[in-house]
Image (tube, grey):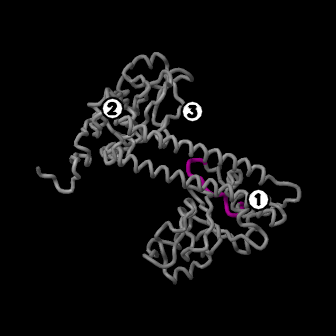
């Protein structure tokens, strides 16, 4: 017997990679029936109701591929009854075929009368485990198939025929499929519980901020400019001062919006030479300076750590140097980050999706209430820092759980690890 090179013993080579010899590779159209709302099955605004059967669309699937009907859409009972083949039942798999390609959800409980809107297709599994197939479609292996052949015209789209031709690797028995699905479902439950805990901790922090940052007797108000050292509030240079032709492969770093948005000093790879740096020295970033994003995703703030690459801010940032001899920079950070304060510095008069920071004259004068004594500022900041540390630790744990689940999917859904 000749074993093909590089294929492990007991495995076979398929179009989607190596799977065990006793597994089969089947098409979605072979393991289930696929239907959608097309042509006359569509509906108009006249069919929309305040109550009645759900019409499930892409917006009802969250980023974790869970059903969220909190912002539900309803249609008339007459329109619902027109298309029995797309009535939604427990264990049905719904796949987005237009727009948010890649979103998939399984109906894991009874939800009452429901159907799908024209952006969705419904996959109903015949004999195999629906939840196993759901997990495969949400895995990187399944997602690669879903996203590899989308329409390139305007809105991303896949056809029902394409959905019917997704290739699914299947263990030989439903028992093994169910064992894999159970293991992944258990991992999902851990992730969901941790997400709920993080959300709860964030709500607790918001409540604490409402109380801790509420002005009290003996507090003072200081403008942002007053909290900074002299000339410590600087808006980034005009765009013409940092044209692309000035950028180098190495030298002095040009800090961008993403450094503030993602709170990471290492992002970005734009640099300028020493001569340009000296020309722009007014915009130099130093340890403990705050940088703030000024357009698009605005108001995000990040404090430069003690280890950083020497450089300057670009035109989309401003930097603030707090007078730490008088004020707590940590107190300033928490107050500035507070969504109640953020509303004061966002210019909402221009309309449209793109918002900007308020004008610099107004921004400089924006006041922040704080305890007169720096020691009390520090005390408040320490409480909020401890809360942040707890949330950050939980978020790191959540990231770890998600990585573990991804590894489980990669191994379990290709038969590298067998549970039965």
Which residue of the protein is positioned furthest toward the front in this rendering? 420
* Residue in the picture at 57% in, 23% down: 50
Look at discs 3 and 2 and give the one toward the viewer: 2
Q: Nearer the viewer, residue 318 or 177?
A: 177
In this view, 101 is above or below 79: below
- Indicate yes or no whether the magenta region holds residue 357: yes
Q: Which quadrant of the view contains residue 244?
A: bottom left
For label 1, the crowd category at 10 Å Cα-Cα, with few meaning under 14, some 14 to 19 and many 20 or more, is: many
| Rendering coords of residue 111 (x, y %) | 50, 25
Question: In the rendered structure, which disc, 2 or 1, sits on the residue that comes first in sequence?
Answer: 2
Q: Tag 3, which secondary structure? A: loop
Q: How many marks?
A: 3
Region in magenta: 351-362
- Which mark is on residue 70? 3
* Left or right: 98, with 381 as reference point: left
Return the residue at label 2: 174
> Quick one: 147 or 107, which is closer to the camera?
107
**Label 2 packing within 10 angstroms: few (<14), some (14-19), many (20+):** some
Q: Nearer the viewer, mark 1 or mark 3?
A: 1
Determine the secondary structure under disc 2: helix
Name the spot of residue 168 as percent of width and height, x first: 29, 39
* N-terminal-most mark, 1 or 3: 3
């Amino acid at each position: 017997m000749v074993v093909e090179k590089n294929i492990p013993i007991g495995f076979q080579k398929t179009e989607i990679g190596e799977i065990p010899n006793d597994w089969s590779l089947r098409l979605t159209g072979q393991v289930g029936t696929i239907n959608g709302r097309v042509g006359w099955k569509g509906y108009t605004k006249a069919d929309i109701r305040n109550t009645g059967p759900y019409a499930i669309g892409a917006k009802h699937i969250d980023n974790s591929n869970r059903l969220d009907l909190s912002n539900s859409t309803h249609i008339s009972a007459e329109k619902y009854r027109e298309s029995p083949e797309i009535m939604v039942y427990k264990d049905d798999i719904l796949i987005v075929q237009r727009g948010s390609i890649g979103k998939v959800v399984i109906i894991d409980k009874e939800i009452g009368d429901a159907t799908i809107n024209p952006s969705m297709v419904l996959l109903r599994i015949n004999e195999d485990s629906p939840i196993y197939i759901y997990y495969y479609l949400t895995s990187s292996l399944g997602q690669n198939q879903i996203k590899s052949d989308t329409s390139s015209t305007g809105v991303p789209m896949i056809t029902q025929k394409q959905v019917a031709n997704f290739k699914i690797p299947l263990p030989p028995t439903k028992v093994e499929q169910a064992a894999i699905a159970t293991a992944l479902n258990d991992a999902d439950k851990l992730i969901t519980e941790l997400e709920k805990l993080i959300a709860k901790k964030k709500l607790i922090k918001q409540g604490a901020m409402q109380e801790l940052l509420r002005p009290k007797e003996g507090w003072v108000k200081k403008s942002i400019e007053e909290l900074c050292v002299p000339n410590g509030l600087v808006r980034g240079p005009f765009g013409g001062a940092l044209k692309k032709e000035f950028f180098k492969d190495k030298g002095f770093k040009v800090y961008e919006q993403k450094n503030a948005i993602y709170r990471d000093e290492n992002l970005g790879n734009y640099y300028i030479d020493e001569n340009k740096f000296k020309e722009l020295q007014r915009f130099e970033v130093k340890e403990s300076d705050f940088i703030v994003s000024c357009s698009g995703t605005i108001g995000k703030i990040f404090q430069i750590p003690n280890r950083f690459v020497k450089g300057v801010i670009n035109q989309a940032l401003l930097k603030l140097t707090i007078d730490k001899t008088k004020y707590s920079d940590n107190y300033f950070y928490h107050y500035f980050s507070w969504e109640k304060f953020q509303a004061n510095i966002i210019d909402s008069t221009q309309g449209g999706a793109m918002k900007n920071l308020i004008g610099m004259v107004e921004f400089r004068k924006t006041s922040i209430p704080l305890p007169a004594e720096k020691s009390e500022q520090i005390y408040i900041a320490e409480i909020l820092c401890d809360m942040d540390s707890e949330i950050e630790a939980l978020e790191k744990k959540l990231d770890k759980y998600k990585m573990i689940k991804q590894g489980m999917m990669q191994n379990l859904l290709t038969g590298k690890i067998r549970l039965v």
